[in-house]
Image: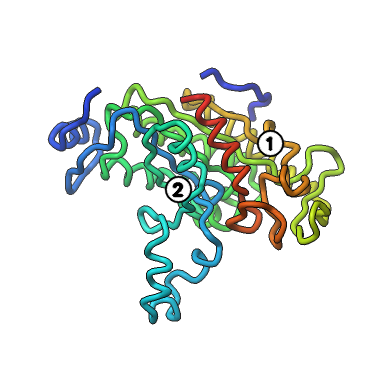
């Protein structure tokens, strides 16, 4: 397996007929055509670190109790979502758009794997969000390939080489699909925010209920998986001619064990992290950090 880690260096609106013709020549099937998104737009696929929806809404949606009440149904249905996936109003793709003025099409989804991201790219193409005027496509995936959702995709637990090459293949497929439609679009692979502490022995702080006194547990295993995911993302970007952003490095002192205001990832049980949406997911500050780093590479 490859080793090393360095940062990879990095129009007019399209008519529906042009989009259909492009698809025909690139093998992308479309049962219907869609009006293209604005020129210069950014399309994002990513997992729950990107979607980052309210955890209660995300947990109860689809339950009989919610469906039986028009009030709770509205509570779910009025929340931002795309393609059946809830997305926080302050997740990093929306902050990216707000902070830069760049139109962003958010196709992120909780539990998304790299293979799932390939399917979401197909949906974004069919919807007209990826088109010849698209500025960039961002694929923030990789961590879920190690877990149960990755197993459903065919990954074998602890088969690090298999997970590594599956991610490379899926990112290359994403890049090929995008470039067939939008040859000038940048492909960006942002890393994941640091969860565990940077210094050995590594720790993770899943309980944050006393102000500025996070409760730590041994986190060497978590840190190992984080490092492996970073390694995989870097080489996947290399193989696809994409830009890798090392967000794990730039957020390494803002992990779950950082002070409340500096914490970019909330604990699992957490009452002290400002702007928390989901346990063990980005705080508002964490989402702001990712938005800023991605903006630097557009």
Identify the secondary structure beneath mark 1: loop
The spot of residue 23 in percent (x, y) is: 21, 35
In the foreground, 287 or 231: 287
Residue linked to disc 2: 108
Mark 1 neighbour class, 10 Å CA radius: few under 14, some 14 to 19, many 20 or more: many
On the question of residue 180 being in view, the answer is no
- For this view, does 191 lie left or right of residue 78? right
Question: Given the current orientation, which residue lies at the most extreme top position?
Answer: 9
Residue at 22%, 43% in the rendered image: 29
Residue at 53%, 60% in the rendered image: 54
Mark 2 vs mark 1, foreground winner is 1
Residue linked to disc 1: 251
Residue at 54%, 18% in the rendered image: 9
The spot of residue 224 in percent (x, y) is: 74, 43
Question: Given the current orientation, which residue lies at the most extreme left position?
Answer: 17
Residue 245 falls in image quadrant = top right
In the foreground, 230 or 90: 90
């Amino acid at each position: 397996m490859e080793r090393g880690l360095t940062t990879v260096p990095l129009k007019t609106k399209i008519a529906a007929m042009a989009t259909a013709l492009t698809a025909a020549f690139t093998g992308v099937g479309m049962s219907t055509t869609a009006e293209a998104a604005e020129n210069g737009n950014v399309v994002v696929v990513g997992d729950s670190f990107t979607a980052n929806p309210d955890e209660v809404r995300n947990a109860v949606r689809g339950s009989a109790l919610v469906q039986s009440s028009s009030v709770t149904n509205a509570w779910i249905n009025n929340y931002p979502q795309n393609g059946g996936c809830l997305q926080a109003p302050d997740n990093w793709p929306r902050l990216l758009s707000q902070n830069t003025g760049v139109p962003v099409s958010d196709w992120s989804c909780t539990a998304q794997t790299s293979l799932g991201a390939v399917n979401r790219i197909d949906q974004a193409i069919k919807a007209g969000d990826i088109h010849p005027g698209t500025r960039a496509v961002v694929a923030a995936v990789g961590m879920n390939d190690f877990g149960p959702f990755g197993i459903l995709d065919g990954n074998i637990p602890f088969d690090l080489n298999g997970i590594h090459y599956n991610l490379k293949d899926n990112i290359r497929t994403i890049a090929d699909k995008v470039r067939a439609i939008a040859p000038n679009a940048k492909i960006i692979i942002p890393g994941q925010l640091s969860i565990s502490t940077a210094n050995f022995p590594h720790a993770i702080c899943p309980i944050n209920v006393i102000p500025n006194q996070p409760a730590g547990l041994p986190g060497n295993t978590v840190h190992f998986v984080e490092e492996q995911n970073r390694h995989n993302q870097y080489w996947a970007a290399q193989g696809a001619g994409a830009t890798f952003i090392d967000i794990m490095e730039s957020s390494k002192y803002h992990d779950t064990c950082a002070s409340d205001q500096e914490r970019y990832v909330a604990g699992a049980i957490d009452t002290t992290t400002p702007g928390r949406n989901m346990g063990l997911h980005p705080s508002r500050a964490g989402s702001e950090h990712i938005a800023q780093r991605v903006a630097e590479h557009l």
